[in-house]
Image (tube, rainbow, N blue to C red):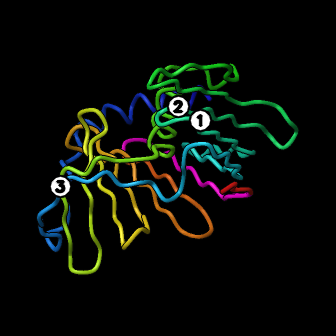
């Protein structure tokens, strides 16, 4: 885990040198009514269970990730091993993050911030659209997370991809399909794959 921390600090420096992100030129801006759209993958009042695999700098650990959304911007997530040991337990109360528990090997501010930011993006139930783009087939809804842009690739009510920015740089890509959700970092060598086990709708 110390090696992961060292690599993460180096990645922050390296990420500051990465180029700014722009949507591909095929996506042209179109008029929008700045509507609020719902996340089709999660909603308030539901509990979700995933088989989670996290790969970071050559290290892989897996377990069961449980998530419960009690209100907009209010949720709790916990990852346990197959043997029942808790690796972390985070809670978000209206934007205020609380660490209920984290295993000592992962108890670093940079790791906690990275994980909770991912879950904040994953479990967001609604977005306010500020701009819209299309290539004729796929629509891209632009929203904001604080001061950072979020690009949502949609077709009808289906959300297939989510790009989360950090400043002007691409921070993470979320890819949604019927089998899993993949979270890929662009400033760290971190990848998270979530396979749904139980979804209560």
Tally of numbered discs: 3
- Label 2 sits on a secondary structure element that is strand
Mark 2 → mark 3, Cα distance in angstroms: 26 Å
Q: Residues within 10 Å of mark 1 (few under 14, many from 20)?
A: some
* Residue at point 54%, 51% (across, down): 42
Residue furthest right in the image: 83
Measure the C-alpha gap from mark 3 to mark 1: 29 Å
| Residue identified by numbered label 2 | 74
> Mark 1–mark 2 contact, CB under 8 Å?
yes
> What stretch of residues is rendered in magenta?
187-197
Place of residue 158 in the rendered image (x, y in percent of width and height, measured from the top left): 44, 68
Name which residue lies at 62% across and 29% down. 1
Q: Residue at 30% across / 48% down in the picture?
A: 150
For residue 76, side relative to residue 130 (left or right)? right
Residue receiving disc 3: 131
Using the image, tell me which numbered label, if any, was put on residue 159.
none
Is disc 3 placed on a helix, strand or loop? Answer: strand
Residue 91, relative to residue 140: is it above or below? above
Can you name the residue that lies furthest to the bottom here? 136
Magenta run includes residue 55: no
Q: Is residue 14 above or below residue 94?
A: below
């Amino acid at each position: 885990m110390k090696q992961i921390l060292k690599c993460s600090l180096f990645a922050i420096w390296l990420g500051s040198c990465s180029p700014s992100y722009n949507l591909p030129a095929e996506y042209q801006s179109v008029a929008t009514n700045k509507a609020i759209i719902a996340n089709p993958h999660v909603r308030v009042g539901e509990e979700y269970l995933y088989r989670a695999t996290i790969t970071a700098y050559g290290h892989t650990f897996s377990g069961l990730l449980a998530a419960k959304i009690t209100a907009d911007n209010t949720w709790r997530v916990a990852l346990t091993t197959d043997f029942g040991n808790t690796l972390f337990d985070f809670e978000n109360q209206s934007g205020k993050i609380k660490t209920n528990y984290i295993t000592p090997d992962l108890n670093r501010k940079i790791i906690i911030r990275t994980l909770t930011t991912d879950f904040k993006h994953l479990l967001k139930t609604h977005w306010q659209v500020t701009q819209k783009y299309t290539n004729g087939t796929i629509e891209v809804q632009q929203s904001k997370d604080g001061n950072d842009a979020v690009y949502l690739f949609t077709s009808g009510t289906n959300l297939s991809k989510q790009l989360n920015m950090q400043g002007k740089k691409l921070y993470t890509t979320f890819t949604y399909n019927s089998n899993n959700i993949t979270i890929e970092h662009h400033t760290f060598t971190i990848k998270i794959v979530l396979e749904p086990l139980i979804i209560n709708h």
